[in-house]
Amino acid sequence: MFAYRHTLKSHFITDIIKLGNGKLLYKCDQCDKKYLSHLSRLSVNKHPKLNIQNIHEMEGKPNFKFTNYDCIGFDLDNTLARYKVGNMIEMEYDIISKFLVNKKGYSKDYLLKPLDHNFLIKGLIVDDENGNLLRIAPDGKIIQATHGTKWLSLEEISKYYPNRRWKPTDLFTEDPMQTWNGPYSERMRTLLDYYDIVISLIFARAVDWIDELGKQKHEKQVYNIWPDVLDAAVYMFNRDHFQNDEGEYFPQIKASPEKYYYKCSDNLIKWLQMLKEKGKQLFLITGSHVDFASHTATNTIGANWRDYFDIVICYAKKPGFFLMKRDFIGLNGVKETGPVTLEDLKLGGIYTHGNWTDLKQFLTKQTKVLNPKFLYVGDNLVQDIYTPNVHCHCDTVTVCEELEAERTHGFTENWHPDEQFLCSTIWGSYFHCKVTNNITNWYHIMKNHSLLCVPSLEYVATFPVDHEFPVMS
């Protein structure tokens, strides 16, 4: 957390003949046409109804199966548990903006305006010192930016950042952990998921207000907005607030769970059951504290949600969970008791904090497999995908709702109910920048650090549990 069906289309390839000149001959069983092409996907795409999944398979890419893994882990929020993102974003904007107006003295004329969902996009980078929001390419080069809500041209970007380069974002693309803590974490912040996506608009409007004050006083203003935003986030998400009904966020979700959560489908529940029946060790690692995690899981997976997992880790403080050697902490209800050693971890247990090294040892022992294969599924590209893949050599699957919202990368048939909140007419695609013709750093992480990227686990559950998916390429 911030403070701490698509079905295959009707054309299927039945015959693939590799010719001596490096070309492939494809035959579609529905339209009875043949397509001669190089291995290039661009040529194959001349078939107007050919699904991207077929393309990957035809090119001979290795396939991915969940059942190839012995131990499969899941994030909870926005992975197994799906939120009604639009409602949650509207609530978060209302809480944070009013907090800044009422507690920090920000202008209601700027912050309490109606939510502009077109400005929102996941993954923006905050430069608090300059009052800017940034998007970057895989090499760290800045490809889009605003100052407050004002769009910056490439020339204007270069005035802030010579050659459109900035040391913090360069370091971030080398390894995001370089800017997660330490001095550079004070200079740039990443807005990675639906818990903090609204901060971009709030920050931008606050910059506009401060700039207007500067014009009136004929002096350059200091922004320093981020500490106030962080206070607002702590007000919302402090883990003690769930029990105490404080901070507005938890009380509203508790009062109206049907407004903010989707129930898991029978397909998804059966899919989890099938994995269990095939002897897979399933585990849950979530940043939420046990009370909120239980509330979320109960309202999405069901009252017996713990039955699907061999072990549950709450308040895991990812990405530190994958990097550090924190003790697991036992629980008595929602109250933490004390450290629990590796030897004392129990099947069916629920703990807080902890670390990947001990969890892996524990699950390895349960599988009785010499070198079991591990997989982790999540939505946060730094906490759930990059860090476990790079630092723990764990295979990952990315859940990215923007695939369905933008109807891209083969996911073209379904309509996302919160499309207006996930698709920005200002920034453009989450995956690609038209202005500079670059893919974004986030798409780069997805492609290079996850084997599979899906819009939801509901999509996955429409297939048999041992279905072969094409890997990312």
Image: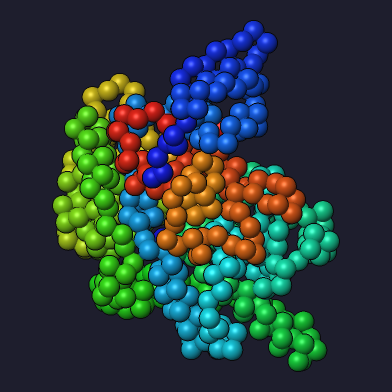
Determine if residue 326 is in view. no
**Quarter of the rendering occupied by the N terminus:** bottom left
Q: How is the image coloured?
A: rainbow
Q: Position of residue 22 (x, y in %)?
A: 65, 14
How many numbered markers are drawn? Answer: 0
Which residue is located at x 43 percent, y 67 percent? 86
Q: Position of residue 155 (x, y in %)?
A: 83, 61
Vertical comparison of 139 with 194: above or below: above
The answer to which quarter of the image holds residue 64 is top left
Q: Position of residue 174 (x, y in %)?
A: 64, 43
Vertical comparison of 319 with 270: above or below: below
**With 442 as the anchor, is 14 left or right in this view?**
left
Q: Nearer the viewer, residue 19 or 286?
A: 19
The answer to which quarter of the image holds residue 201 is bottom right
Which residue is located at x 58 percent, y 12 percent? 18
The answer to which quarter of the image holds residue 203 is bottom right
**Quarter of the rendering occupied by the C terminus:** top right
Q: Nearer the viewer, residue 439 or 200?
A: 439
Q: Nearer the viewer, residue 301 or 382?
A: 301
Q: Position of residue 406 (x, y in %)?
A: 54, 53
**With 118 as the anchor, is 247 left or right in this view?**
left
Vertical comparison of 348 with 154: above or below: above
Which residue is located at x 54 percent, y 42 percent? 409
Q: Nearer the viewer, residue 220 or 119?
A: 119
Which residue is located at x 36 percent, y 77 percent? 247
